Amino acid sequence: MWRATVLTLFPDMFPGPLGVSLAGRALTSGLWALETRDIRDSATDRHRSVDDTPAGGGPGMVLRADVLAAAIDAADVASDRPRLLMSPRGRPLTQSSVAELAAGPGPLIVCGRFEGVDQRVIEARALEEVSIGDYVLSGGELAAMALIDACVRLLPGVMGKCESGADESFSEGLLEYPQYTRPQTFEGRPIPEILTSGDHAKVAAWRRAEAEALTRARRPDVWATRGGRKGSKSTTDG
Ligand code: SAH
C-alpha cells in the first residue's frame, strides 16, 4: 500500500485536509496510509530542544542535524522509499514528478520549520529537496500536504473514473479546457453551444483548441515543454 511517512514538529496538523473528501475517504478505506512522527520525540536533552541559533549568526533558529537524523533513523523506512525534504530551495514539484511518486511505494517527508534545517543532515541522509513554488511558507507541513494530496488522487481506486486524471491540467503539457454545468444560462451567459450538441468529436476538438489557446496565453513555459513530445504518450517534463 502507498504510504506517506511525515516527520514534523506539529503532528496535530495531520491528517487535517487530507482527512476529508477524496483523500480522506481513500485513507479511511485503506487505499493509502499516513504515518506522522513527531521530530521532538528524538530530542535528547531535558528541554527536548530541536533547534538552535544559526552558526555564523543571523535571525531565527535552525533544526539540529543530530535530532533530525535520529528522527529519520527512528522512522526506519524501507530503502526504496524516496526521502524528501520540503524546501523552497528544492526541485519544483510538477505533475510528472507527482505521478512518479504516486507510482512508487510512497515517500518519507521531512517538514522544516524556523529558518530551515542544518545542511549536514540533508547530505548525511541524502534528502531530496522539493519545493511547491517560489514563495516561502512558515513550515513544510502545508507543502507536504499539497504533495501528498496530489499523489493520493492518482492512486488506483481513489478517483471515481479511472480516466478522470487523464484529461487534467498538465497531463499532456496543457492546461485544462473550461468546464460548464447546469444551469444552461447563468446571468445571461449560455453554455457554449457545441458542448450541448451531442457531437463528441466536435466537443473533443473544441476542448483541445481551448486548452491549447489557454496554455499558450497563460503558460508559455508549459507550452514550450510540449515541443519534444508531440504525438508521444510520455509525460516527462523534468
Ligand atoms: N530560510 C528558508 C525558509 C524556511 S521556511 C529559506 O530562505 O529558504 C521554513 C520551512 O518551511 C522550510 O524548512 C520548508 O520545510 C518549508 N517551506 C517553506 N516554503 C516552502 C516551499 N515553497 N516549498 C516547500 N517547503 C517550503
Image (tube, rainbow, N blue to C red):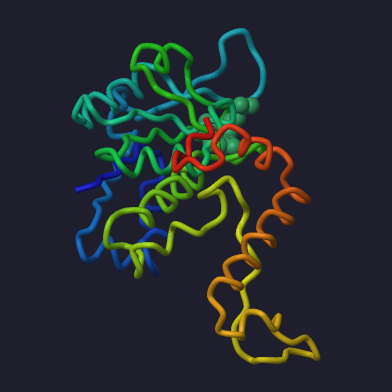
- Which residue occupies the foreground of this view, 154 or 164? 164
- Which residue occupies the foreground of this view, 151 or 180? 180
Where 79 sits versus 216, above or below?
Answer: above
Where 193 sits versus 84, above or below?
Answer: below
State the residue lying farthest toward the top.
56
Whole-percent x, y for residue 8 in the image: 39, 39
Where 60 sits versus 2, above or below?
Answer: above
Whole-percent x, y for residue 167 in the image: 50, 59
Q: Residue at x 21, y 65 (%)?
A: 29
- Which residue occupies the foreground of this view, 33 or 12? 33
Quadrant of the rendered image holding ligand 1: top right
Q: Residue at x 49, y 44 (%)?
A: 95
Q: Residue at x 39, y 22 (%)?
A: 127
Describe residue 128's horizontal placement relative to residue 103 as left or right.
right
Tell me if I can see residue 45 in this picture: yes
**Res 180 quadrant in image:** bottom right
The mark tally for this picture is: 0
Whole-percent x, y for residue 49 in the image: 40, 27
Tell me if I can see residue 113 in this picture: no
Q: Residue at x 80, y 91 (%)?
A: 188
Whole-percent x, y for residue 192 in the image: 71, 80
